[in-house]
Image (cartoon, rainbow, N blue to C red):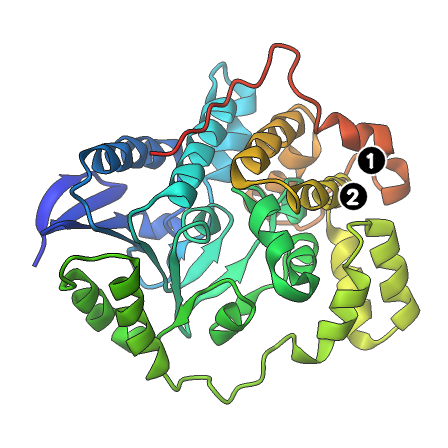
Amino acid sequence: MFSPHTSGEDVLFDQVGDKFVLTLNRPKALNALDLSMIKKINPLLKKWHEEKNVKMIIIKGSGEKAFCAGGDIRAVSGAKSVQNNIQQDFFKEEYKLNYGIGTSKIPWVALIDGITMGGGVGVSVHGHFRVATERTLFAMPETAIGLIPDVGGGYFLPRLPNHIGTFLALTGFRLKGRNVFTAGIATHFVEHAKIKDLERDLLNVKDANLLNTKEVLNYYHDRCSIEKDKPYILAEHLGLIKHAFSDYDISGIVQKLKNDSSDWCNTQLQTLNKMSPTSLKVTCEQLRHGSTKDLRDVLVMEYRIVQRIMQGSDFYEGVRSVIIDKDMKPVWNPKTLDEVSDEFVQSHFEPFKDGDDIHLEPF
C-alpha cells in the first residue's frame, strides 16, 4: 500500500500516489513532538507545497495511546542549564509548522485517535479536518506547568462557541470522544475500528481537493453511531461557562464561580487554585488579544510570551512538579493572583528590543 518516501525513527513519511501519510512515531513518549521531528517535517512540507503535486496530507500517531500528547517539554525545560538555543529554536520551528498548516491549501487531515494535547493540538486544529474517535482525549493543560496554551491556542480557543475555549485554556479540562466534536474542535467523529478503512478511502480519492476529501469524511461521520446518544459533558454548564468565562478576566471568573457555589463551580475553583497564577493572568490576556488577531500575529505574540516565560521560574517549577518529580506540589512565584501585577503581565507581550526574530511564512 505504501511506498516509502522518507523515514526516520521519530517521524515517518509514506507516499501513496499523490498523497502522503505523516506518522508521528514516538509511541513510548506518546508521540510528543521534539525539535528533531519538527525539523524533519517542515522542509518536506515546504517542498511538497512548492512542487504542487501533493493532493492530500494525512497526519496520525503510532501506537495505541496517542495522536500526540504535546511538545517535548522536558527537553525544553532542561535546556535552561545548558548552553544551547533549544528554547528559541523549538518554539520557532513549532510555530512555523503551525502557521504552515494553518495556511496550507493542500487538504490536511489529522486523525486525532488518542491523546491530543498541546503540540498535538497545534499540528491538527489549524488544518482543514480533524477526525476524533471514542479514544480521543483533548486538553490544553499548560497552565498547570506555568506555561500558556500556545501553538496558536490564542487564535482557535477564543473562537470556540460559548466561551468554552477560555474555560478549557484556564482549567485544562479534558474532553473525551464525541465531546471533542460537539465542542467544535474536531470536524468529524468516526469510530476507532473504522479509522483504517477511512484512511484507505481517503488515499483512494481521485483528484483530491477539499470538497471530495470532505465527502469521504462526511460519509464515515454520518454512519457513526457510537456515543451519539451520550449527552455532551458540558451541556448543563454552558450557560454558566458563557457567563463566567466571557470577560478574559481571571479575577472576575473566580468571583463568578464563587457566587454560584455549586459543586461543579467549586471543582473548577479548586482546579484554578492549583494553576500558576502568572499563567492564568497571562493566558487571559493572550486570549483577549488573540480573539481579534489573525493566526500569524497570534503566533508571533505567543513566541514573545513563551520566551518571557522561559526567563521566569514557574515553567521550570511546573515541569518539575508535574513531569519530573510528579509530586503535584508546585511552588509558584508569585504565589497568588493578587501578587501578579498588571505590569508584569503586560511585560510578556512587549516586542523584543532588537525586533522579533521569528519569521512566519506559508509553505
Q: Quadrant of the C terminus?
A: top left
At a point 57% along the width and 19% down the height, the residue shown is 356
Apparent side of residue 113 relative to residue 274 in the rendered image (left or right): left
Nearer-the-camera pick, 28 or 187: 187
Q: Looking at the image, is 23 positioned above or below residue 100? A: below
Specify the label residue 334 is tagged with: 1
For label 2, the residue is: 277
Specify the label residue 195 is tagged with: none
Q: CA distance from mark 2 to mark 1?
A: 7 Å
Q: Looking at the image, is 269 positioned above or below residue 151? A: below
User: Measured from the top left, where is residue 325 in percent x and y?
Assistant: 59, 44
Q: Amino acid at mark 2?
A: Pro
Q: Amino acid at mark 1?
A: Pro
Q: Secondary structure at mark 2?
A: helix
Q: Earlier in the sequence, mark 2 or mark 1?
A: 2
User: Measured from the top left, where is residue 39 in percent x and y?
Assistant: 32, 30
Mark 2 vs 1: CB contact within 8 A: yes
Residue 93 visible within the image: yes
Label 2: how many residues lie within 10 Å, few (<14), some (14-19) or many (20+)?
A: many
Q: Secondary structure at mark 1?
A: loop
Residue 191 visible within the image: no
